Image (cartoon, grey):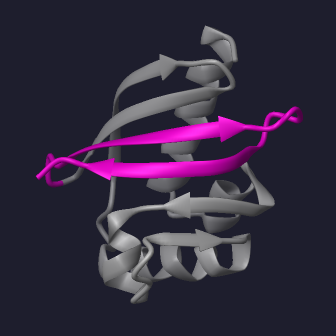
């Protein structure tokens, strides 16, 4: 992952979330991608905090968006790794978050993990 590629991904990802466009958001992911988040435990009643597959994750994100109609992210920083990036951002309430994205050979996310500040 190059710096330019990471910055472009982060910009597009933030814009897609701010538009509340699930199809646009999901276009960045493989069909069988895995997501982990402590919010999955709360919103989806999934004790592992993990979901696999676009359809299950679409339902999770749709639930999250319906409960937060004013959801908006502001990009704070992008960190480049080997085959991965971390995006640090805040939401409309100022709550800090960081999400790690792992990319396949085609540039799609096959795994992500969200982390939230208290």
The structure residue drawn at horizontal position 11% and vertical position 53%, both measured from the top left corner, is 118
**Is 44 positioned to the left or the right of 26 in the image?**
left
Residue 52 in magenta?
Answer: no
Residue 75's place in the image compared with 62, above or below, is above
Between 101 and 25, the one nearer to me in the picture: 101
**Which quadrant does the N terminus fall into?**
top right
**Is 58 positioned to the left or the right of 107 in the image?**
left
The structure residue drawn at horizontal position 14% and vertical position 46%, both measured from the top left corner, is 94
Residue 20's place in the image compared with 66, above or below, is above
Question: Which residue sits furthest left?
Answer: 118
**Is 95 positioned to the left or the right of 98 in the image?**
left
The boundaries of the magenta stretch are 93-118
The structure residue drawn at horizontal position 56% and vertical position 60%, both measured from the top left corner, is 35
In the image, residue 73 lies at what x, y percent?
34, 46
Asked where in the image residue 90 lies, by quadrant, the reply is top left
Question: Which residue sits furthest front?
Answer: 48
Is most of the magenta stretch helix, strand or loop?
Answer: strand
In the image, residue 76 lies at what x, y percent?
31, 27
């Amino acid at each position: 992952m190059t710096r330019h590629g990471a910055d472009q991904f982060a910009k597009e990802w933030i814009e897609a979330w701010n538009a509340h466009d699930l199809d646009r958001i999901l276009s960045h992911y493989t069909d069988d991608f895995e997501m982990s988040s402590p919010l999955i435990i709360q919103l989806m009643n999934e004790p592992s905090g993990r979901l696999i597959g676009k359809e299950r994750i679409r339902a999770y994100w749709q639930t999250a968006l319906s409960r937060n109609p004013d959801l908006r992210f502001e990009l704070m920083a992008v960190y480049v790794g080997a085959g991965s990036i971390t995006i640090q951002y805040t939401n409309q309430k100022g709550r800090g978050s960081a999400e790690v994205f792992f990319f396949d050979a085609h540039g799609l996310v096959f795994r992500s993990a969200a982390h939230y500040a208290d």
